[in-house]
Image (cartoon, rainbow, N blue to C red):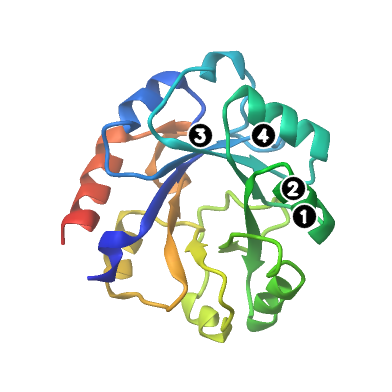
Amino acid sequence: MVRKSKVIKVCGITQSDQLRQLEGLPIDYVGHIFFEKSPRVINDIEALKIKTSVNRVGVFVNESLVQIDKVAKELSISTVQLHGDESAELCVQLKELGFTIWKAIGIQEKKDVHKVDMYKSYVDAFLFDTKSSAYGGTGITFDWTILDAYTGQTPFLLSGGIGPNEMEILKKYDHPQWLGIDINSRFEIAAGYKNIEMIKNCVTSWRSE
């Protein structure tokens, strides 16, 4: 029953019409990706300059402080997700600018969990994703039992290949610092274009039980 209060983020939103469709669903965040090598990269920022009731997360990979600040202000983004090999110093600088910081950590084996140590004092949450040289977007889950090794106090979101079947499995998952989930490619018709009806059915079911 713990999932009722868990955060749901739908990442990889590229179009304003889909953003509008998600506004009425029981989700907490939408993610916009600003990494040029991602198939879900935002190419038209102007089209997304609309007011929305859903909190926006800007996803950046090894981007500069100046560019992150510029893009985030253009789209009224208050939460920045760093999904690359960023330094703790960048986290501090972004915090000083008033942003909420989420740091993604790629997980493949237990030793990867210890990467949190250099960031734990400077971020608001971690996002544990499947380890990949492409910095995410694999559509593949990792072994969640690895996170039993995480004993930190900073909350985290689960990411990496979460689809309808995984959401069912997550009904039994628990961890004292588990904040919520990040869903993306497994809910798509095509890269960057979500199956809104599938999202609606899954998140509504997940919330209601």
Q: Amino acid at mark 4?
A: Phe
Alpha carbon separation for disc pair 4 and 2: 21 Å
| Residue 141 seen in the current view | no
Q: Is residue 185 left or right of residue 68?
A: left
Q: Is residue 115 left or right of residue 5?
A: right
In front: mark 1 or mark 3? Answer: 1
| Residue 24 seen in the current view | yes
Q: Secondary structure at mark 2?
A: helix
Residue at numbered disc 3: 191
Of mark 4 and mark 3, the one earlier in the sequence is: 4
Q: Residue 104 location in percent, x, y?
A: 64, 58
Q: Amino acid at mark 1?
A: Val
Disc 3 crowd rating (10 Å Cα; few below 14, some 14-19, many 20+) is: some
In front: mark 4 or mark 3? Answer: 4
- Disc count in the image? 4
Q: Is residue 74 left or right of residue 13?
A: right
What numbered label is drawn on residue 92? Answer: 1
Q: Residue at x 62, y 31 (%)?
A: 41
Residue at numbered disc 4: 34
In front: mark 2 or mark 1? Answer: 2
Q: Residue 206 location in percent, x, y?
A: 24, 57
Q: Residue at x 49, y 61 (%)?
A: 157
Of mark 1 and mark 4, the one earlier in the sequence is: 4
Q: Find residue 197 and report its image quarter.
A: top left
Alpha carbon separation for disc pair 4 and 3: 14 Å
Q: Amino acid at mark 2?
A: Glu
Residue at numbered disc 2: 96
Q: Find residue 44 and report its image quarter.
A: top right
Alpha carbon separation for disc pair 1 and 4: 20 Å
Please report contact status of discs 2 and 1: CB closer than 8 Å, yes or no: yes
